[in-house]
Amino acid sequence: MSTAVHLAFKEIARNKGRFLLFSLVIALITLLILFIAALGEGLGSGNREYLENLDAELIVYQSTARLSIASSQIDLATRRMIRSVDGVEEVAPVGFGSAAVPRADSNEFLDVALIGVEPGMPGEPQAVEGRGFERIGADEALIDRTVALIGELRIGDPIVVRTVIDGEDEFHTLTVVGVCDSQKYGLRSSVFVPKRTWDNIRPQVMLMGAMGAIQPIYNVLLINVADSAEPADVIAGVKSRVSNLEIVDPVTAYENTPGYSEQQTTLATQNGFALLIGALVIGGFFQIQTMQKVPQIGMLKAIGTPNGIIALSSILQIFMVNLAGILIGAAVTYGLALVFPPGIPIVFELRSAAAAIASILIIGPVGGIVSVRYSLRVEPLTALGLNS
Amino acid sequence: MTTALSAERVGKEYPVGNNVVKAVDEVSFTVESGEFVALVGPSGSGKTTLLAMLAGLLYPTRGHIFVAGSQLTTMKEHQRSGFRRRNIGFTFQANNLVTYLTALENVELMLRLNNEYTRINRKRAKELLVLLGLEDRLNSLPRQLSGGQKQRVAIARSLINRPSLVLADEPTASLDTERAFQVIETLASLVHEQGRAGIIVTHDLRLVEYADRVLQMLDGRLARIVSPSDDLACLADPSLCGAIPMDTLGVSK
């Protein structure tokens, strides 16, 4: 072991330039893989963050919407019917729309998801600064951190919300009463408003109810199930009373959001290819190096160096070069992440970054296996210029 | 003196198409401890193949080889590797040294491989290099050494483990005449002083004056054994010499 370590370290120490070049290539691969992982996480969380953080157990869609929130339309009469189902503790409507708010750094607007929620009910996120909603018709907004950052908004500031109604821009001024953690939906940061305010801002989402009365409609309903009830029983109870509904839990909801799985599969494929290319590049580098060292390996074997020492020395070098590359790549990625502007869907999440790094740690030796095997097959006879 | 090396009717054949080529044919001889033997012959005469078999790098097709009383030809590959490490010292024509180790580290490598990397042995490695005139080159990398200096480091490495047998394959091939003489003289004197058995393969007949005996190979066969004090003209031109009776070939000096 110690001779293998000695040989591995001495070769690296006396050929720093060459091995640093190897490490830099691995650092670039690490950078690429971490960014793809971060992009996957960013796009994934940008699509699912709000649904993932929901304080509700079930989400009710119009069945024809096929779990597309934008296509789902549910009126308040449905809510009333669901509320009377056994086991339903709370049921709240949520409406989703598009809007824009001014950016502080330019005259441009930031596209946001405008989400109408009922104060104190499932769907309203927890305010981490300021407070939540108290009245359903208040001209108030609860904004997520990204909106606060890009709009340079604080509690008590007015926020202008631009919506497009019948092709015309409409502007509504609300007061920021609270800031919540990031709650992206549809790759946009969110601005929450009380449901009646949402009704006012988005007047086209109304339908004619019975007796000609206009009543608002929402996209989905959120249900919290009583402790004594099972979600499956509640789903069955709701469906027996109201037809034309689809009811799922939040995880099923975001996994079946149109385009979500396709997007994640695409990114996972990219990641897989990046890892494969990484393995080939690392393997290629070490193979070239081994081929250049054939006469020396032959000499080492001729003087009686065991195969184990030669193999272990190569594996240690691959591991050290790989580790150095990963550390450089991770440090550069971290540095870049610090200067990345907010709003770009890149999220460095510890779990996915650790998985990416573990993958690169594995692909190094996998890529180098061919060169190790090659070095083991070098004949000691080559030291004498002979072949067996 | 004890017999350090014994080759008994050693042969090596290679199939070439439908024919069999005898690279080495029925070679027998012995080398005693403290004896330095030169193996000469034209290119293709089988010198290097014979050396490879004596080193345990190549299995003979027939015959037996004994080094320090152990039969090499019955050992498995990993056993031969360990045996070489402990009992055989090597100097090659080129690529002798590990390029990323200094002169001293190259010599010490043999100590590490044999788990003999002790303070006393490290001191001995340094002394050996000093003895070979490399006192100011101990920490030089091979690329910083001349051809002759590299070969002297290789000689030090081949001797550091006190091997029974020291083998050198054309160690002076890339050296000028003066350095070639220096290297051979050094190797021969160390073999004699330390009581090792040494075999050097060389093309250069001027260098055989340092050998105790000269073994001439021709067409894979051991053609004759002569003393450097004999008329060496027949080594350069075999037609000048009469045939040596085969029964004398296995007899050491």
Image (tube, helix red, strand yellow):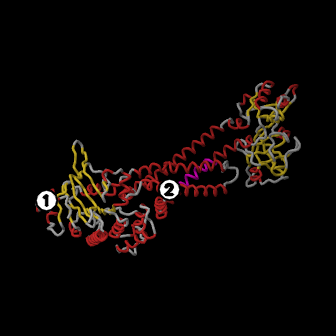
Secondary element under disc 1, as helix, strand or loop, is loop
List x then y, in percent, for residue B134.
37, 73
Seen at 66% across and 44% down, the residue is A43
Identify the magenta region.
Answer: A26-38
Is the stretch drawn in magenta largely helix, strand or loop?
A: helix
Q: Is residue B6 visible?
A: yes
Quadrant of the rendered structure where residue A60 is?
top right
Q: Nearer the viewer, residue A290 or A78?
A: A290
Q: How many marks?
A: 2
Determine if marks 1 and 2 fall on one subunit. no
Question: What is the CA distance from the residue labelled 1 to the residue labelled 2?
Answer: 56 Å
Q: Would you say A299 lies left or right of A40 here?
A: left
For mark 1, does the 10 Å Cα neighbourhood hold few (<14), some (14 to 19), or many (20 or more) residues?
few
List x then y, in percent, for residue A337.
65, 55
Q: Which residue is mark 1?
A: B244
Seen at 83% across and 38% down, the residue is A199
Secondary element under disc 2, as helix, strand or loop, is helix
Quadrant of the rendered structure where residue A79 is?
top right
For mark 2, does the 10 Å Cα neighbourhood hold few (<14), some (14 to 19), or many (20 or more) residues?
some
Which chain is home to disc 1? Answer: B
Q: Nearer the viewer, residue A333 or A9?
A: A9
Q: Which residue is mark 2?
A: A316
Q: Is residue A90 above or below residue A187?
A: above
Residue A28 is covered by the magenta coloring: yes
Label 2 sits on what residue type? Leu
Q: Would you say A342 lies left or right of B107 here?
A: right
Q: Would you say B31 lies left or right of A275 here?
A: left
Q: Is residue A208 visible?
A: no
List x then y, in percent, for residue A227.
82, 35
Label 1 sits on what residue type? Ile
* Closer mark to the observer between disc 1 and disc 2: 1
Q: Nearer the viewer, residue B8 or A376?
A: B8
